[in-house]
Image (tube, helix red, strand yellow):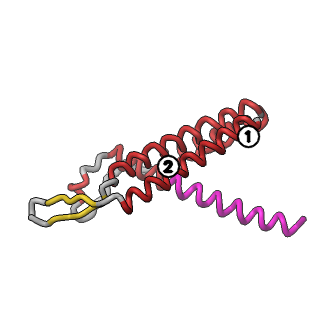
Amino acid sequence: MDAKTSKFIQYLMYALLGVSIIMIFAFYFGGEESITFSSGKEYMYPSFTDNIIYWMYALLGVSTISALVFPIISMAGNPKSAKNTLIGLVGLVAVVGLAYLLASGAIPTFHNVEKFNLTESMSKNVGAMLYTSYILGVIAIVGILFTSISKSFK
């Protein structure tokens, strides 16, 4: 990354931090509003609640774009790291595919299951994500053990 881009990112981060601090002060010291529920109970909440939620969405958008764009720029500058990244992505897709094949579409039975309106595809997707978590957890544990054991033989 060149110096200009690095400086720009640094100033952007300072600006985002500054606006976030202002939003925090506005949230805590900006006054209160009230809402009355149909039961007659009144609830007080900070006036800037909506604004801070919108700011959170903006920060989420900036971080998501950054997380997607900067690795692509980095890979374009270093094709060898791009190869390793693509191998990792293919491996992740393979793990998710294997988990999807292992997952069952059977709808579980438990008390009040009908209120969740589960379908077979929803059940299969949840099962696939659970299996993905299990497989990645086992890979992480095996990797940690392998690294520890291989270090002791060096």
Looking at marks 1 and 2 on the same chain, the residue that comes earlier in the sequence is marked by 2
Q: Decide if residue 85 is on the left or right side of residue 31.
A: right
Pointer 1: residues within 10 angstroms few (<14), some, or many (20+)?
few
From the viewer's side, name the closer residue of 127 and 3: 3
Q: Which residue is mark 2?
A: 19
Mark 1: which amino acid? Asn
Q: Position of residue 1 (x, y in %)?
A: 75, 37
Q: Position of residue 52 (x, y in %)?
A: 39, 51
Q: Secondary structure at mark 2?
A: helix
Q: Extreme top residue here?
A: 76
Mark in the foreground, 1 or 2:
2
Front in this rendered view, residue 126 or 83: 83
Q: Amino acid at mark 2?
A: Val
Locate residue 61 relative to residue 48 in the image: left or right. right
Q: Main secondary structure of the magenta part?
A: helix
Give how far across and how far down residue 129 sits, in percent: 47, 51
Q: Mark 1 = which residue? A: 84
Residue visible at 56% across and 46% down?
15
Q: Is residue 109 above or below residue 19?
A: below
